[in-house]
Image: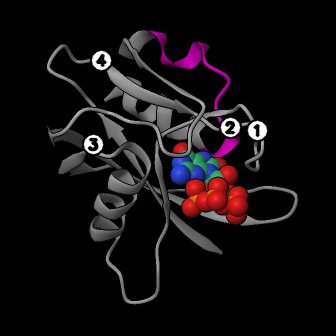
Amino acid sequence: MIKVTCAIIVNADGLVLAAQRNATMSLPLKWEFPGGKIEPGETAEACLIREIKEELHVDIEIVAPLPANTHQYPNVTIQLIPFVCRITSGEIILKEHLDFKWVAKDELLALDWAEADVAIVKYYMES
Ligand SMILES: Nc1nc2c([nH]c(=O)n2[C@@H]2O[C@H](COP(=O)(O)OP(=O)(O)OP(=O)(O)O)[C@@H](O)[C@H]2O)c(=O)[nH]1
């Protein structure tokens, strides 16, 4: 099982950042929370801070963990480990994703999410 962290980045207006995977990634064009795989010896929190810097070019602080979701794709099983986060410095520059948008909490489910994210989106919407 692959452990993957992801960031539910919330801005001052309470909007949530959704990022769209590019056409050449796995799960092309699906929406996700940015993040990535935990490296050996790395904590989930350190992984997420590193991945967000690499992918979005901003610094974040972690506000709170949410329950992880294990999801079986046809070729791989991932454990997706979410954290609510805030940007502490920088402007977003997309390094890997095709697009991003700030979405109101009650409109999140309208996006075409990666399957593993759906349970996390629902949990967050109800929290
Ligand atoms: N970062 C991130 N990955 C997710 C989410 N949901 C989800 O199913 N994934 C999957 O978790 C894995 C995370 O990989 P990654 O972001 O570190 O790197 P990657 O796309 O280059 O990996 P890959 O080439 O193995 O697909 C991918 O298989 C991705 O499809 C999510 O919300 N955020």
Q: How is the image coloured?
A: one colour
Closer to the camera: disc 3 or disc 1? 1
- The answer to whether residue 6 is above or below residue 90 is below
Distance CA(mark 2)–CA(mark 3): 23 Å
Question: Who is closer to the viewer here, 64 or 35?
Answer: 35
122 relative position to 30: left or right? left
| Tag 3–tag 1 contact (CB < 8 Å) | no
Q: Position of residue 31 (x, y in %)?
A: 60, 31
Q: CA distance from mark 3 to mark 1?
A: 24 Å
* Residue 85 or residue 105, whichever sits in front: 85
Whether residue 71 is visible to the viewer of this picture, yes or no, is no
For label 2, the residue is 22
From which residue to which does the magenta span run? 107-116
- Using the image, tell me which numbered label, if any, was put on residue 14: none
Q: Secondary structure at mark 1?
A: loop
Q: Position of residue 94 (x, y in %)?
A: 46, 37
The residue singled out by tag 1 in the image is 28
Q: Nearer the viewer, residue 1 or 58?
A: 58
Disc sitting over residue 84 in the figure: 3
The crowding category of the residue bearing disc 3, from other C-alpha atoms within 10 Å (few below 14, some 14 to 19, many at least 20), is some
What residue is rendered at 46% in x and 45% in y?
A: 34
Q: Quadrant of the C terminus?
A: top left
Q: Circles 2 and 1: CB distance less than 8 Å?
A: yes
Residue tagged 4: 15
